[in-house]
Structures are given as C-alpha cells and as structure tokens.
Image (cartoon, coloured by chain):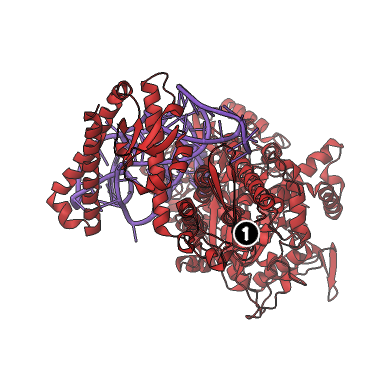
Chain colours: A red, B purple
Amino acid sequence: MKFASAYEPGSFEPDIYAAWEAADEFLPGGKVDGDAKLYDGNPNNDPKTYSIVMPPPNANGNLHIGHGLTIAIEDSLTRYHRLRGDSTWYIPGADHAGFETWVVYERALEKEGHTRFEYSRDELYARVWDFVQEQRGNMELQVRALGASCSWKDLTFTLDENVVRRVYSTFEKMWNDGMIYRGEKLVNFCTKHQTAFADIEVEHKDEKGHLWDIAYQVVDNERSSASEDALLAQRTDSTSRSATPSSLNTARSERPSEIVVSTTRPETLFGDVAVAVNPEDERYKDLIGSSVKLPLTKREIPIIADEHADPEYGTGAVKITPAHDPDDFEVGERHDLPRIQVIGFDGKMLPEAGAEYAGLTTAECRKKVLNDLKDAGLLRGEKEIVHSVAHCYKCDTVIEPMLKEQWFIDVKKLAKVAIEHLEAGEIKFYPASKKQVLINYLKGLKDWNISRQIPWGIAIPMFRNVDDPTEWVFDTRTNLTEIEIGGVRYVRDEDTFDTWFSSSHWPIVCTNWEDGKVNPYYPLNVMETGADILFAWVARMIMMGLYVTGEVPFKEVYLHGLVLDAHGAKMSKSKGNVINPMELVAKYGSDAFRLGILRGRSAGMNQAFSEQSVVAGRNLCNKLWNISRFIQSMVEETELSSDSPKRSSRASSRGSSPVLVVTADVGESDLASVSSADVGATGLDSVSSADVGATGLDSVSSDNMGEDWILWEINEAKWQIESQMKNYRFSEAVETIYSLVWDKYADWFVESQKIYRNIGLLKATLEAILKLAHPFMPFVTEAIWQNLSWTDGLLINAGWPTDFEYDPMSAENFEKLMVLVITARGTLQALSEAHKGLNKADITMLYGNDSLVDDNSLLIQYFTRVKSVISDEGQPRGLRLALANHEVYLDVSSEVVADYAASLENKILAVGRELDALNMRMMNPNYVDKAPAALVKETQDAIAEKSALIERLKLERDTI
RNA sequence: GGAUCCUUAGCUCAGUUGGCUAGAGCGUACGAUUCACAUUCGUAAGGUCACAGGUUCAAGCCCUGUAGGAUCCACCA
C-alpha cells in the first residue's frame, strides 16, 4: 500500500470498513466460529463481555444529526472495549417506526390517488412491507459510513419474527396476570391520521384562543328533580350515585335563574351531561342539585359539586363533557355520569349534536353554535386567552380527545418494581440527575394505551367472540382475520401495538435472551440514547426488562442531549437549519465528523454544533496522517541507509546539524516489551535513551530525554482516556487525543526526532498513539496502520497499549528544556517587536555552566531558530532569560535590551502581584493552621520560587 | 403550575467529592516558513466565572435568594 501524500478520507474509508467487515471483526470476541448468539457460557472461554445496542434508526429513513452523535458515542465505546480485549457486541437495529413510516406511506398513497380505506389491513401491511424493503439499505449504508463497528449479521428489525414472538409472549403473560384490560377511555385522537396516541406522543402548544361565557337556564325545582330522576333512570347500568349531593331537593325561591359557564369549546356543549361548581363556592352552593336546560337542545342536566371547578377561573362554573375532555371524563367517572359522543372520528359533528349541526366540522360547528347562542341571548362574554392545545406531532392537527375502546396496560405493578430497582441503584445514570427524574415520572405514570389504529405494526393478538362482544381470547394466529375455538367464532382486533410496546423489549430481543439460559450479554453494559426519550423508551425498557427477565436490562444509561445548530437553536426543517451528517462525512470524512460531534458535548446537555468543529477534527486527522507519513519516510530512509545496524550518521535536511540515528528493532506484535528503558537489554543493536550511557556508546545519545518525556506523556494520556471512557467523558477524551497527537507528539517529540532519531521508539510510540486514537477516529488510524511498512494485521483488533517504562528524571529534564525554549521564543518575539529589524536568526544564545543546555544545544537551537547556542566562556553578556531559570543569555546589543525594558518592567509587576497574593495567604494564621500541610508547603515553595524569579528579573532589568 | 438543567474568553464548551496563578477549539492580532503537514509553525491579547448574600483558612465549585435561558411533565373548562 502506497502512503498517499494527501489525506483524502473518501479514498480509503469504504475499503477500510469493508476490510473490517470481511475479517469478521465486528463479531463478539472477534473472529469466532459459529453463532455468536449461542455463546456457550463456559467460564474458561469467557473473556469479559461488553454489550451495547443501537437505538434502531427508522429502516426506511435517513440518518439525522442525532443518529450521528449516537453512533459516534456508541462506536467509540465499542471500539475502546474491543481494543481492551472485551468480547464486544454492538448490535445494530432497524425500526419499522410504525407511525412515522405509516405517515410517509399514506402520503405516497394519497399521491397515487388512493386512500387507506380501499385496502384491508393485511393488504396495507404487505404494501408497506414492500415499500420499506425498497427504501431499506439506505440507512444501513449510512450507519456504515459513520464507521459503526456493529455486528451486522445480528441486525434486529423491529418486525422480525423473534421480536413478534417475544412481544406476544409478554402480552400473553400480562393478559394472564390480569394486567391487560380493554377500556373505553378518552384517547388522544388525530382525525387526520385516524389513530390514537399515547399521552407522550402529543405535542402541547400555547395558542391564542377564546373563553366564552354561556348562560345555562336553571329549571324550576319541581321539574328539576323530576328531570334529574328521568335522566338517572335512563342509565340502567349505573349502580352507584353516592357523589350526588344530598341537598337535591332543598329548593329556594330566590335562586338565580341561570348559571354562566366558561368554555373554550362551545361546540362540545351537545355532549354536556352536567355543570360543575366547586363545593366551597358560596355563589353556587344553593344551585347544587338543581338542573339547567342545555342551550340549543331540549335536554336538562344537573348541577354538581366537584373540586375540578376552580372558583378563580372564568365564572367558576364549568360544563362537563366526559366524552370530549380528559378532565371532564374523570369528573364523569366520579359522579357516574353518561358519556355522550358528539364529534366523530372524522372530526365532524355526529347526529347526537342535533340535525342542524351534524356533519359540520368542529370549527364550523363552533361558529354556528356561537351565533345561535347569541341569537338566543345566552352568550354572556368573550375573552381572549392563551391556552395550550394538543397537536399531532406529525401533522399538527389538533388532537381530539375521543372515546374509544382500547387495550390498556395497568402499569402500577410495573412502575413499582422499576422504582424499587432504580432506588436500589441498580442502574447508573449519566447524567446522574436523570434517575430521580425517571423515578418521579414512574410515580405518576398513568395506564398505558397500547392500541394504535395503524396497519403498519405488530398485530394485537386478541380475538373477539362474534356472539359475545365482551369476550376476548388471546391467540397468536394474527395472520387470520377470523378463528374458531371450540366451535365459537372469534374475529381479530384490527389494531396494532404501540411501537414503544415492542421496542421496550429491545435489550431482550437483541441479545436473544431466553428464560433459563445463561446470557453473558444481558443485561447490557450500557444503554445509550437521547435524553428526550427517557420516558417513552428508557422507562419502558426498564419496566419490561424487569417484568420479562427479572433483571434490569442495562447497568448504565448514558443520555445525550439535543444537537443544536451553531446558534443554539433547535434544528428543524421549517427553520432550515438542519445539518445532514452525511454531507459532512462526504466533505470532511467520517473521522472528522465523529471528532467534531463529540467535541464540546457532555451527558444530557443540549449543545450547539457547527461545521467548524468538524473542520478542526479533519485537521487533526490530517495532522496524524502527516506525522505517520513522515515517520514512515524516516523508517524507510534509515532502513535503506543503515547497512551497519548499529548506528549511522547522515547529514540532516537542515544541512549542518548531525543526526544520530538510533535503531531499536521492535517486534510490532509485542509492544509490552518496548520501552526506552528495556529495549537496550536486548543487545547493543537496540539503543535507548535511558541506557546508552551505560553501554558506553557515544555520550551524545544521552541527550535524548525527549523520548522519556513522550513515553511518559503517552502513559498519562492512556490513563486519562481510560478514566474518561469509564466516566463517559467523550469530549475530554477527544481533547486528550488532540493534545497528545498535536501539542506533544508532533510539536515536540517528532520535531526533536529530526535532530536525534530513534527509529524503534518512533515506531512504538506511533503504534501506541494509533491505538489510543482508534476509538474516536477509526478510519484514519486503520488506514495509517495499513500504510505503515512494519505493522501487520488490523488495528481494530490490535489491542490496547500497555504502559511504557521510562526514566522520570530524564522526562522531567525535557520539560525544563521546553520551558527554556518557550521562554526564549517569547523573548525573541518580544525583542523583535520592540526593536524593529531585529532578526532572531542573527542572534546567538550564550550559556554559562549549565549541563542541560550544554547537552542539548542542538535541540535548543533547532527549536528556537537562533543563530547558534554556544558557551559564554565565562563572559556572560546580553539579555538574561530570567524566566527560564538557567544561565542563558541572548547576545543582543544594549539598545535592543533597552527597547525591551518596558515589557520587562511589566513582568516584574505581574510576578510581584502574584507574590503578594501568596504572602497574604501565608500571613493568615488560619490558613497555616487549617489547610493541609502539603498545601502550605506548596505555597511556601511558590513564594520562594517567585521571590527568586523577581530577583532574577530585577537583575536583568538592572543590567540594562 | 411542577421538576430538572444551564448562565465561565468574541463564539461553542471543559473545569470529576472546594486548593485556580480558571483551560481547550474556533475566531482575533503579530511574526515565521524551499520539503511530513498553510488542513502548517511560533508568539500574544482576551475572563468581576449571570447578580446579591452566606458557609469556609480557601468558592467557578457548597448553601439561600434574584434575574435570564433550555428541556421535560402536568394543566389551563
């Protein structure tokens, strides 16, 4: 493989991914024979397992930026654990996305001039299935493009047979446990999509509306009680009416003749069955128990007392419409009132609203009702208000609360068990605060409506007795519309399951959990998903996992926040600020996208994202690419030019500086044994920085302390990344890589290797860095690995680096040298700014009796770009570099130094301020008493150091 | 209305049980550069850590309050 000179991710990413896949690297345990899911559970063969599932993207959709983040996070975790040697299983998925897909399909159907009502449910199901199959593959290609190292042969589709089987088995268990019931309840109904929604799927929006006051005429007492009795008599199914006030017959002549109710929905008045007032409300106390005539109708309805009526709101009297308002529904239940449906599922008024109104839309009806009320002189007021209105999250249609028979799960027990396990701390949350949020949610959880009137989904396995509509049987033969059991005919329920009901089984079905079988991959190590579906999904997976398996489905939960646009606004199609991850991948490469999206992101937070951060990521990839190319070229040069294996000298690219080439032959497969301290032990051929002195070779090689330093830095970075990954601090881990590769490896170590070269160490350190970076930037690191002449195999499974051994004293000395260099650079820059025309290439650096400088004069000269670094021969002159704390001078004229004096004075003042602050601290007896001794000592040392620095600076100033 | 979170450099964000002389990327300014990389190198400027109190030897971090913002939940007849 020829190392291309330019970093062009598009040219290698697809090939790299194909190579991983072809080598079966994504299977748990790497290259294993047979079915990974049938893991034998033999403890002797067990590596540590690590399992994670992908929240299934819509099978026929495209990935959005949130998927990009999810995959960047999950795949980084996956690759990290794979490198660590865990048997790692990242399980991909595809979602049938019941409602989402249905909306798309129905739109396509409409375009062809058809409607859903022309087909049976089974026909529709088959058609959508084909539709999805046609579209499918797109999503999977995009997941691949992002580098997800997931086990494709284990891809789970939410309509797969094993999913349906598992869902049916849970449903049956719940049915047998009495947790499933069929109930007529108010459901959130979208009249456009003709389906009900769970509460959580409804979007509430604040909107301007009106509050109308409508007068209901009180009928006289005799008639009132008579009609009340008549009304009650109609309801043969009622057995209890304890809540009816006992003051039913206490009539008073001075009672008001009307009661004015406040409503935002006058059109529902035909469904009114009562008027409620607060029992404490003095204004209406006497009216409780009497009746009013329902305007525009001939009906009479009672006035009841209920806490629901808020005396402060409107007129304090509220009409009760149980069939069209969730609160009223509950009031109706408390008082055992009938439910009269007046709006149809098509959003139009039913005959129950009266002949004049039937067939009108709710909006038309509202208009007419208001007009008619005005004509009748019953409209008493109109006020503009802002109230929140439920909308369909897909088509924005106003949600109608509708009476409908639906399947419900009684969630009390499920929620209780989940809360117990959560409170016992069995699941760790990132961010931690979400645990309590979830517990609070579960505490108030209402029964779960699992019926959806959409053909695209898992059929509810329930059949109704044709002759006895109250009898239902569970049966999995949902491919049949009608079945016969014991001579009795049953017809299938036409509804399908809420997608969350099946997806709550996700960890169970993805890992192929089976009762009684050892499954080292369940519970999952982590569930990573968006914080926005904590309730809808995470909560339900926990409840279902516990119900089905008795265990929590995952040990940790990492929730990511929303990816906002560059200005912190939510991305939306209407705002036109949507960022397409695939466009960024095409433009900058997959690695750049991953680095960019991980950067500046922490658990649970909604954070901005912009192309800029992807550019920064691309630049890092480019940097690593070029470092590697450079090292490869050095390796090639050395191997070509060194017939003598011991060492060879050659002219450097800069001309005059000698380059010492130290070669250490390193077996690439055995990094553990490679360190500067111990390669020397393998023989004279391999010379390392720490032991060359001992071998008696040319003493110049002992200057190579940059090597000890980089080994130390790599160890540090490795340790940091381990801790950051454990704590899900991806952003920081990326920063660590960034700083290691760029600020440390490239800017100091590789630069220093231009002067003193150690090929074995270059190889070993580059390998370690590629491994550390691989989880975050998999493509470029693998491509480099493939390009390097001395590596073999695939990086993806090359293992995590082990610690290097190094000489700490030597590493520390390199840091001193760095300080010296940085100080010299800063001073040189300041000098040339203060004194125009000064060129640092003309300046000589002089040093006194100082072995650090003496030993490293070539390096210092190279890093600072001064003319030369030579001994002052006992005659120091020029400007002393006080900050460097070494006997080092820049040989410049006194005029130049004078020009520089002002900035020197500023420095003295700044250090003086720091010193004052430290002294203040030490003068405080409480501090000396109470602060930890080590800290006090640190302060004392700092004072000593600053004082000395000030002295040096003053000396520097005074010599001017 | 309830809950949770946020407010740190021009922008986007770190800052892990209080020890800070507050960091990074991008941006800005100045300078460098024939060869691994201008997707480069070097240097620098830039902060009353939202505000007001409190606890502590010590507060960006803990406590109380205020203001602004975000998200979620409930609800508005």
Chain of the residue where label 1 is placed in the rendered structure: A
Residue found 49% across the figure and 44% down from its top: A748
Tell whether A162 sits left or right of A744. right
The image shows residue A83 at horizontal and vertical percentages of 61, 62
- The answer to whether residue B13 is above or below residue A833 is below
- The answer to whether residue B46 is above or below residue A305 is above
Q: Is residue A263 visible?
A: no
Element on which disc 1 rests: helix
Residue found 85% across the figure and 55% down from its top: A122
The image shows residue A665 at horizontal and vertical percentages of 62, 61
Q: Nearer the viewer, residue A711 or A29?
A: A711
Tell whether A525 sits left or right of A812. right
Residue found 29% across the figure and 23% down from its top: A894
The image shows residue A654 at horizontal and vertical percentages of 56, 36
Residue found 78% across the figure and 68% down from its top: A476
Q: Quadrant of residue A905?
A: top left
Tell whether A462 sits left or right of A607. right
Q: Nearer the viewer, residue A956 or A443?
A: A956
Query: What is the count of numbered marks?
Result: 1
Q: Is residue A51 visible?
A: yes
Q: Residue furthest top?
A: A836
Residue identified by numbered label 1: A78
The image shows residue A497 at horizontal and vertical percentages of 71, 58
Q: Quadrant of the C terminus of chain A?
A: top left
- The answer to whether residue A440 is above or below residue A566 is below
Residue type of the residue flagged with mark 1: Thr
Q: Label 1: few (<14), some or many (≥20) within 10 Å? A: many
